[in-house]
Amino acid sequence: MDSEWNDNQPIYRQIHDRIVAMILDGLLKEGDPLPSVRNVATESRVNPLTVLKAYQQLADEQLVEKRRGIGMFVNVGAREMLLQGERQRFLTEQWPEIHATILRLGLEQDLLGVAKHERGEG
């Protein structure tokens, strides 16, 4: 796990977001163990309590489960749950601005042509 941190948000949140990205990208699959708190803390040069806080947040969101004595594991359905949330966030937060830019630049017909070409229609 990359240990470059930015000052825009707490480190525990950045660790959380990196684990979420790993699940979304398929690097961590359902049933896979998360890296140990100790390993992440050592590699990232952060306090183990910081990593634990990130992992607890993932557990609170029901993305991972703690198995006493053996670690944290990605829950079944975690990726799909994250994808649904990301899709909804994209449609409500990003798409309106992207759509407005497409309209402002007059790109509707260009995009239709690209879509038809990709489908082998033109």
Image (tube, rainbow, N blue to C red):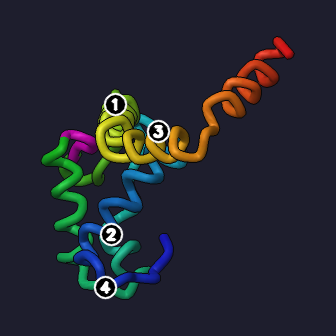
* Tag shown at residue 8: none
Sequence-wise, the earlier of marks 2 and 1 is: 2
SS class, disc 3? helix
| Res 45 quadrant in image | bottom left
Q: Residue at x 17, y 57 (%)?
A: 56
Residue matched to label 2: 14
Sequence-wise, the earlier of marks 1 and 3 is: 1
Q: For marks 1 and 3, give the one nearer the viewer.
A: 3
Near-viewer residue (76 or 4): 4
- Does residue 118 appear left or right of residue 20 in this picture? right
Q: Is residue 78 visible to us here? A: no
> What segment is highlighted magenta in the picture?
62-66
Label 2: few (<14), some or many (≥20) within 10 Å?
Answer: some
CA gap between label 1 and label 3 equals: 20 Å
C-beta proximity under 8 Å, tags 4 and 2:
no
Q: Residue at x 44, y 42 (%)?
A: 100
Residue 63 horizontal/vertical position (percent): 27, 42
The type of residue carrying mark 4 is: Asp
Near-viewer residue (26 or 104): 104
CA gap between label 1 and label 4 equals: 28 Å
Sequence-wise, the earlier of marks 3 and 4 is: 4
CA gap between label 3 and label 2 equals: 29 Å
Residue 65 highlighted magenta (yes or no): yes
C-beta proximity under 8 Å, tags 2 and 1:
no
Give the position of the C terminus as an image quadrant.
Answer: top right
Sequence-wise, the earlier of marks 1 and 4 is: 4
SS class, disc 4? loop
Residue matched to label 3: 99
Residue matched to label 4: 7
